[in-house]
């Protein structure tokens, strides 16, 4: 195989984004071969540009005309289409989240492990952004020493009522399975655990429909603890304007801070623990200096993840976002919401069945459609 024939299942906002960059040849050795959507108008747009058009994802998978698919449907459909693709011998790249809840993701990953010759990937484009790659490199090199604190305020996910009214499935337990944690800032949760590892326990404080006429969470504060004693706070909202996006990671040797497209590293001249043990005065602290860490802008991070997926299929390079990694951020989102609803700390790994039972009760109690 010299080129990968892609199908895109789902032509909403993000599905069209994927289809368009494939049409525009922004991914080398890849073509847009087919699309699937229930909308005749959306299908027609790509059919006129040379792609085969199908009225359903199932019919696209059965046609045998693609080597790989990008799945960009509503959340609850992701694992079913992912499993369907693998069973049809097709590589699958799934938009976040890989499932609406952990139990469904577990079934998808079982199907993937049963077919090791096929690739399952996640669309976590932050992993392709140079700023996060720089941060990960510095952490792995030991620039921060032992991580002791993580704070991420990402309240710049502002959305209006018009956004939530754009589709019946949006911001409902039945259609989406969650709110800001599962839809918007799952990218941040993925980047957080990619940089710092998965926390061992979480305590969530969610507000449901605080700023919008919706069922699910739109304002969140979460406390995180790691097994080695590091702690963190994660804050997100779709109702705060102008909003803030600041990530701080503090360690025994210094601090990384990312805000307003500026990345800085403050280095302690002496590890803070060693300084504390050896200092002869009580009100001093290690000398430090701050340096700006330059990084390039990410031109097309979604296309970069897809390019990596193509390179993995054709050349065997490692995936930037393998399917199994999709479990981490999904579990964090599920656990924070469950913790808030049950008013207690949740240990990780969390039982997928536990959250599925809670989610099913929320679906049963909610109206099937919003006005």
Image (cartoon, rainbow, N blue to C red):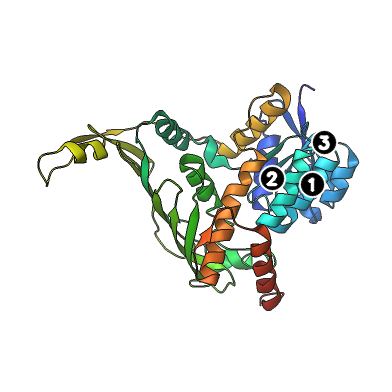
Which tag, 1 or 3, sits closer to the chain's start?
3
As drawn, 229 above or below 144: below
Instruction: Quickly name the residue at label 3.
Output: 66
**Among the 4 quarters of the image, the one containing residue 49:** top right
Instruction: Quickly name the residue at label 2.
Output: 94
Q: Which of 196 and 62 is in front in this view?
A: 196
Q: Residue 281 carries which label?
A: none
Name which residue lies at 56% across and 37% down: 301
Residue 9 position within the rendered picture, expressed as x and y whole percent measured from the top left: 76, 47
How far apart are the alpha carbons under marks 3 and 2?
15 Å
Name which residue lies at 56% across and 74% down: 213
Within 10 angstroms of label 2, few (less than 14), some, or many (20 or more) residues?
Answer: many
Residue 260 position within the rendered picture, expressed as x and y whole percent measured from the top left: 37, 45
Name which residue lies at 57% across and 41% down: 125
Mark 3 vs mark 2, foreground winner is: 2
How far apart are the alpha carbons under marks 1 and 2?
11 Å
As drawn, 287 above or below 165: above
Mark 1 vs mark 3, foreground winner is: 1
Residue placed farthest to the front in the image?
Answer: 277
Give the side of residue 299 with respect to residue 308, left or right: left
Q: How many labels does the image show?
A: 3
Give the side of residue 211 with respect to residue 311, left or right: left
Give the SS element for disc 2.
strand
Q: Nearer the viewer, residue 201 or 156?
A: 201
Residue 159 position within the rendered picture, expressed as x and y whole percent measured from the top left: 52, 62
Q: Can residue 173 be seen in this view?
A: no
Q: Which of 84 and 283 is in front in this view?
A: 283
In the picture, the quarter occupied by the C terminus is bottom right
Instruction: Quickly name the residue at label 1.
Output: 83
């Amino acid at each position: 195989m010299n080129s990968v024939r892609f199908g895109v299942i789902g032509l909403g906002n993000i599905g069209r984004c994927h289809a368009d960059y494939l049409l525009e040849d922004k991914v080398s050795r890849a073509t847009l071969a087919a699309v699937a959507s229930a909308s005749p108008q959306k299908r027609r747009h790509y059919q006129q540009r040379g792609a085969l058009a199908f009225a359903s994802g199932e019919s696209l998978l059965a046609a045998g005309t693609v080597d790989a698919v990008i799945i960009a449907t509503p959340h609850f459909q992701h694992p079913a289409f992912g499993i369907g693709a693998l069973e049809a011998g097709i590589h699958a790249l799934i938009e976040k989240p890989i499932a609406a809840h952990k139990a469904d993701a577990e079934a998808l990953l079982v199907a993937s492990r049963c077919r090791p010759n096929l690739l399952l990937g996640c669309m976590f484009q932050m992993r392709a952004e140079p700023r996060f790659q720089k941060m990960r490199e510095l952490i792995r090199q030991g620039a921060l020493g032992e991580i002791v604190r993580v704070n991420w305020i990402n309240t710049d996910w502002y959305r209006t009522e018009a956004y939530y009214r754009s589709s019946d499935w949006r911001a409902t337990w039945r259609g989406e399975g969650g709110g800001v944690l599962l839809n918007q800032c799952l990218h941040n949760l993925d980047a957080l655990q990619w940089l710092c590892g998965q926390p061992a326990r979480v305590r969530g404080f969610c507000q449901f429909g605080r700023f919008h006429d919706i069922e699910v969470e739109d304002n969140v504060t979460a406390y995180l603890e790691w097994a080695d004693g590091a702690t963190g706070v994660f804050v997100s909202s779709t109702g705060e304007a102008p909003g803030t996006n600041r990530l701080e990671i503090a360690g025994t040797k210094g601090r990384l801070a990312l805000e307003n497209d500026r990345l800085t590293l403050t280095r302690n001249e002496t590890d803070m623990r060693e300084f504390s043990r050896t200092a002869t005065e009580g009100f001093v602290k290690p000398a430090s200096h701050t340096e700006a860490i330059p990084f390039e802008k990410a031109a097309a991070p979604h296309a970069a993840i897809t390019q990596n997926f193509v390179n993995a299929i054709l050349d065997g390079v490692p995936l930037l976002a393998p399917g199994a990694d999709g479990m981490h951020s999904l579990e964090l989102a599920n656990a924070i919401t469950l913790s808030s609803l049950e008013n207690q700390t949740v240990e990780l790994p969390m039982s997928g069945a536990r959250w599925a039972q809670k989610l099913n009760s929320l679906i049963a109690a909610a109206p099937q459609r919003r006005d």
